Image: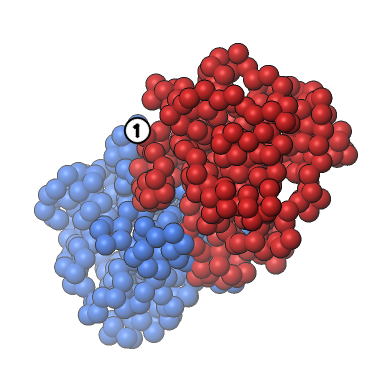
Chain colours: A red, B blue
Amino acid sequence: MTYPLLGFDEKIAWRNQRNDVLTVGELLIDMISSDYGENHESSEYRKFFGGSPSNIAMNAKKLGIRPLVAASVGEDGFGKYLIERLREAGIDTDCVQSVDHSTSMVVVTKSTATPVPIFYRGADYRLEYTSKLEQALLQSKVVHFSCWPISLAPARQTIERLVETAREHGILVGFDPNYHPMIWQRGEEGTAYVKSMIGKTDIVKPSEDDSERLFGKDTPERQVEKFLELGAKLVVLTLGKDGAIASNGKETCVFDTFAAEVVDTTGAGDAFWSGFYAAAVKGYTIREALNLGFAVSAYKLKYTGAVADLPTLEAIKEMYGL
Amino acid sequence: MTYPLLGFDEKIAWRNQRNDVLTVGELLIDMISSDYGENHESSEYRKFFGGSPSNIAMNAKKLGIRPLVAASVGEDGFGKYLIERLREAGIDTDCVQSVDHSTSMVVVTKSTATPVPIFYRGADYRLEYTSKLEQALLQSKVVHFSCWPISLAPARQTIERLVETAREHGILVGFDPNYHPMIWQRGEEGTAYVKSMIGKTDIVKPSEDDSERLFGKDTPERQVEKFLELGAKLVVLTLGKDGAIASNGKETCVFDTFAAEVVDTTGAGDAFWSGFYAAAVKGYTIREALNLGFAVSAYKLKYTGAVADLPTLEAIKEMYGL
């Protein structure tokens, strides 16, 4: 009972569910330096709510749909902080598990050279498959995850069971194949596993860098082909300022970017996902949902930070003349 | 060839060695919040050089002896930062190992309630016993460590071998029994192991809290007895504003505090260790070295931060009329 081909001019026939999108995976602290003083004692950092799927949930809520976050955080101040941010936003935290490991964190130090993040993975990959999580999934229209939770056990097995259950019950599976060796288990060839996961998902949205890390350098068209060959039903390859290519294997569409002004690219991909899901859930066609996703992404690009203070999807639709 | 009883009015008969004190263990980032906004997005933190034995080395250098740091940091910006701070201070970093794990960090958020640190242990406990480390030990007068490296493998085995080698070669072993379940391996009873380690060391400096975590509540005199019974040659139990008690099992001395002004207690214990080692190495008697340790500690208490900008040992000696 997996999803059929996703036609560009079709709407997804959703079943009536209590939740719209269940995002599963990293809910963590982004600790970002305020200045370029990477080598000075006492240089300043600021903490932010973070984690790609959690940011998607935050955005989706603002755009007007019902997200649910499944993640695992530490029984510490950071964990409490993250849970409170979700509650403040009106997002159900029933599936946020608290575990006896430090809340995961990514430290990003602004640098005159390329800034390289430092990953502190404690609680995030301890996510367990529970009956509560299964119930949340069965009451959702979409389940979404990235490469983080599949990079380490036991979260990997949790995702595998969620995907299996989603496919059995006709729940749409969205996957961000943002593979990077730095988050992957030491000594394991991550690309093979990520590729095996692509075949079990409905929608993937790789960037050009993601594609290159998985398949090596190639033209955008051929990269899209490779994702389709692995079994993805809809591939959305983003090309930065050159827009995007999307294909369902039968039809391929090219999308220009809506971004006239780029202030900060952080979170642009998450903004796309949230716009796409919000539109698809609200009954727009795949083509319309993709356009609305790109519009939300363009809106976010005008602001600094991972999560912009988004208006409703309808306001963005009007803003971008869609 | 272990150390004989350390008489209070005796000087330690040091052999001629290239280094004075080899500190082994945690070299890490202290990430400390600037404000009490524990629950606000974007609240501010500052990064500092940290890790008790590394702070002792920094202090000891300022006091005028030759320390050497053995530790393991990540191949990342934080690791580079820590190594550069040591180099700047003129401390040899030959025994700082760089490993493929994130540099360890302790996050402390100021809180209106009790601030609870969050531990991010990556690189620190990956310290390996290498021939370079063994050579460094054999060229040192003292080796010092805390509970951090013995809390997790493989650093635990590294410390065990270092202690064994130190005892074989008449190198003084100083141990800070700062046991805390939060840094200990999950599911392991840490106190039994820490107690077994006390018997293999020459000098221990527990606080009252350390003693209580190891033995339960008791009078200071009886706590000192317990450390001696385990085999420590010299026990220095610090009592905060009430000074300290030191005993070698034959003779017990009470020390009043020199601290007239207490601004920040962070690093007071490390300041004691560095003052004690500096004085002992410079040829003062045990009693004089203890007094000079307490004087350095009192000096540090007047300043904020883990490491004060200490003058030389001679200047502190004069300042406190010793």
Can you say whether B91 is above or below B309 in the image?
A: above
Residue A216 placed where, x, y %?
A: 83, 37
Instruction: Give me the chain letter of mark 1.
Output: B
Q: Give me the residue at 47% from left, 75% from top.
A: B62
Q: Give me the residue at 34% from left, 81% from top.
A: B317
In this orientation, does residue A164 appear? no
The N terminus of chain A is located in which quarter? top right
Can you say whether A92 is above or below B286 in the image?
A: above
Residue hosting label 1 = B188
Q: Give me the residue at 26% from left, 75% from top.
A: B262
State the residue lying farthest toward the left.
B219
Towards the viewer: B104 or B197: B104
Q: Disc 1 residue type? A: Glu
In this picture, residue A130 sits left or right of residue B16: left
In this picture, residue B215 sits left or right of residue A126: left
Q: Quadrant of residue B107?
A: bottom left
Towards the viewer: B288 or A233: A233
Towards the viewer: A94 or B268: A94
Residue A292 placed where, x, y %?
A: 66, 45
SS for tag 1? loop
Residue B78 placed where, x, y %?
A: 58, 58
Residue A116 placed where, x, y %?
A: 66, 54
In this orientation, does residue B294 appear? yes
Callout 1: 10 Å neighbours few (<14), some, many (20+)? few
In this picture, residue A28 sits left or right of residue B92: left
Q: Give me the residue at 38% from left, 50% from top.
A: A88
